[in-house]
Amino acid sequence: MLQTQELQVNIGPQHPSTHGVFRMLVTVDGETVVDLKPVFGYLHRNHEQIAEANTYLQNMPYTDRLDYFNSMANNHAYAMAVERLAGIEVPERAEYIRVLMVELTRILNHASAVGFMINDMGAWQTPLAFGMREREKILDLFEMASGARLMCNYFRFGGVARDLPPEFIPNLRELLVALPAYIDELERLLRDNEILLQRAVGIGILPREVALSYGVTGPVLRGSGIPYDVRKAEPYSVYDRFDFDIPIGKVGDVYDRFLVRIEEMRQSKRIIEQVLEQLPDAKGGHINPKARQNVRPPVGDAYARIESPKGELGFYLVSDGSGKPYRYKVRAPSFINLTPLADMCRGYKVADIVVILGSIDIVMGEVDR
Amino acid sequence: MPEMSPAELRARLAAALPDALVDVAPLAMTPPPAHGPQPGMFHPPDPFVHPDHLVAAALFVRDTLGYALLSDIAVVDYLYAGCFELVYRFYHPSGGPGIVLRVRVPRDAPQVPSLTPHWPAANFHEREAFDLFGVEFVGHPYLRRIYMWDEFEGFPMRKDFPRQGDKYLGGDE
Amino acid sequence: MMEPPFEIEIPRGRVIEVQRDDSRVRRGGGLLRGMAVIWKHWKESFRLNRSYSQIHGTFTIQYPEEKPRIPEAYRNMPILLYDDETGHELCTSCFQCERICPPQVIHMTQAKDPATGKPVPAVAEFIIEYDACMSCGFCAEVCPFDAIKMDHEFELSTDDHAQLTVHKAQLNRPISYYASIAPTMWAEVRESALKKLQGNIRRRPDVIGIAPHLTERIAARRAELAAQAAAPSPAAEPASPPAPSAPTEARKLTPEEKAAKLAAIRAAKAAQAGDGVTPSAEGGTPAEAPPADDKAARLAAIRAANAAKKAAATDAAPAATGEPTTPTPADDKAARLAAIRAANAAKRKQAADSVDTEEGS
């Protein structure tokens, strides 16, 4: 009998498909994965300790850099946490603008996440370019509103930094005309592709019964069939005023997560349309005029979480009464979503690891902080 | 959507696991200033659990109360008060606001039983707490550093870790 | 542990299960559907697409021949503004941007009045480390004088690292430049910024605060101030002790007016207390003059000596006639101070002479 030997193979940290500097120590028996140990820390910038040295307002641009794909979502969660801690209210128009920005972020994140995942499968940049296409238009919108494409730094305590410029809404309406066709096209490009089906169906299954116990959230959890979405579970901001559905998957494999993301893009578009209908006029104010940006919250703690495109993003802030946070903790979705990575990969081939990692959709800025 | 206030949670825990609950005094985060207004004391309403009964309390929360989503384990270093506080945050899959359990351990002997063998969601949270604060989770299957390299000495997020300059950053310059 | 299926009520929405298999597609058909999408895009790629509402067409911008449209709010690196007309920088060195900067890359020193050593609302040196700047825009947001704004220039690559520590000379831009790149944003703050600038200009002595590269403007200003100092203005009545005409409106005084007022008060006190004191000739040390502390006395002596050098040709008569609306430079202050003292001395001498002549005749 031929004896096989288990070999430990190192994937990363420098790797085009690991979504950043991420290292995996994979124990393989032939081509089949026996065990997988993720190694983090290559992008660890000690963000939490930097935040303890800065004032609350000075932390806002640093939160942009956590999940650097979705800076608006990070800003939102942090602004909500500080507002909860300091008791600052947000005017309605500002809430609607915030929801608008986060839903646009969700569309652009899912589009590029899908693109990157298919790129990792070997489809080599075509779906990636398709995914990035409308992302560029949304980034132009962000640039119009906040001044920067990726590191938006747009949210302030009590509202947003600046009101929407006059050319924003007309451009957004034009974009909404194009979005359904775009999402349909992205789906049609890939959905029934036989190669994709071979590489995604039945791969990386996270069974429904154990999905909750792993603590995963976001499209990974919903792909496994559990309809938990923070926007519906504990509605924050003005999400309780919108009608939208929650897509869930059946099996919990890579294909389900892909389809869930596509469908979530459609639901985000629905939310944006409702925001545009209900947006209060400019007199509403884009920021609470009584809100001080150099907050000195009373002693206490607060936790605020949002449904970021990657999962549940939460900020836990402890205040000691001064202008700087005493403890600032980020509950990063990508970090926790990696918990079941080893179990999801066991038994599959080495080539599937990259696909499974792509379907979890991680960003190392968040994982390592 | 189920909602449970901290008082209700405390009552239910007291009924089911009477030894688990601990009463704690309000905590001063910083030494009192020489003059000027004194900041308040920190006294959260959530129930505090004794470390030895932590696993039982967490499993009670999951199995009996149904809060099956462990979202976050946060560690806070209260240097002046001399303790670490761990904040466990649970959510119900049907939605609604979550519940919080807190554990306080002394700073010089921070051992807490690990939830990971029973609840895999705690895995990376506990490794991060160990790496950055030095809280030891007894029973964790793979308690290694997660961010810093394995041979690193010191626990960076502790309040007494030198912020600028230590043996790794050339502190003696 | 909650057993599936979960009963979860979702408000205002449904839970939808994604459709996995599409029975309409034959085997091999999926690839062809994808190729159909690509084919359509390829066909359409021969026309330009510059509209948000279309998804087909080429929207590539041929950089660097074509530049992208940059919105007004775009922020890249900070710049400092100075006024086109007067040449004055808007920055007063209030340190708000330095305090708020998250990576702490702004450093500045406040300008000081060379005569008194007091801080002046102008900035002496201003340094921004462009290589560490996050372009967050906080400095522009908090500036109370709208002096620091975010530029649109993004082609900053260089192979000289030291060049990225940018000093005030490279940071200065005229307001017209900023108004051209961000007209709406500047229009919102223009009035208040210029009003504050006028107030600051009044408090800035000499040429402090004028952007250093405007050498002709600085030279012109210096010439103007020198002309004002040297011009033999007709002697006002020396009997009015607050010799420079007092400001008629209630507003803050320029440094020169303040010094003149102080000198006038001291002179008045000296006149009261120093009756019988030997009238000091012009240029003599006013050691008996009222300033009790040594420093002020020495300072006054130095000024008197300088004024003596300047006004050596003319006689001691002229008193300054500083008009309240034009700020006079600090070095004229000394001349006027000496002139006032000389005038008072002359008055006393005149009184003494008249007494003498009365007695002596």
Image (cartoon, grey):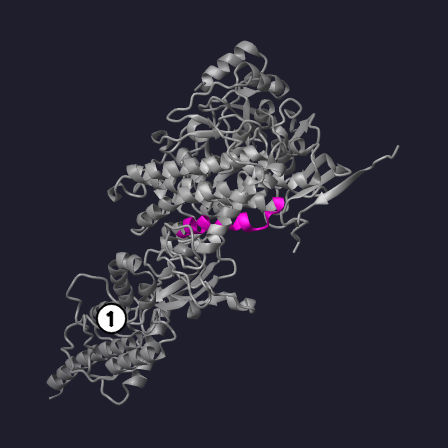
Q: Residue furthest top?
A: B15
Quarter of the picture containing the N terminus of chain A is top right
Asked if residue A124 is among those painted magenta in the image, a careful observer would answer: yes
Nearest to the observer: residue A96 or residue B72: A96
User: Which chain hosts label 1?
Assistant: C
Judge whether A181 appears above or below C332 on screen. Answer: above
Query: Which stretch is magenta?
Result: A121-140
Residue C139: x and y in percent read 40, 55
Quadrant hosting residue B148: top right
Residue tagged by mark 1? C260
Nearest to the observer: residue C231 or residue A4: A4
Residue A23: x and y in percent read 67, 44
Circle 1 residues within 10 Å: few <14, some 14–19, many ≥20: many
Residue C111 in view: yes
Asked if residue B87 is among those painted magenta in the image, a careful observer would answer: no
Exactly how many numbered labels are in the figure?
Answer: 1
Residue A54: x and y in percent read 48, 46
Q: Is residue C120 left or right of residue C240?
A: right
Nearest to the observer: residue C192 or residue A68: A68
Circle 1: element type = helix
Q: Residue furthest front?
A: C26
Judge whether C236 appears above or below C58 on screen. Answer: below
Q: What's the residue type where badge 1 is placed? A: Ala
Give the prevailing secondary structure in the magenta stretch.
Answer: helix
Residue A59: x and y in percent read 47, 45
Judge whether A153 appears above or below A99 on screen. Answer: below
Residue A311 in view: no
Q: Residue at x 44, y 48 (%)?
A: A134
Quarter of the picture containing the C terminus of chain A is top right
Q: Is residue B32 left or right of residue B131?
A: left
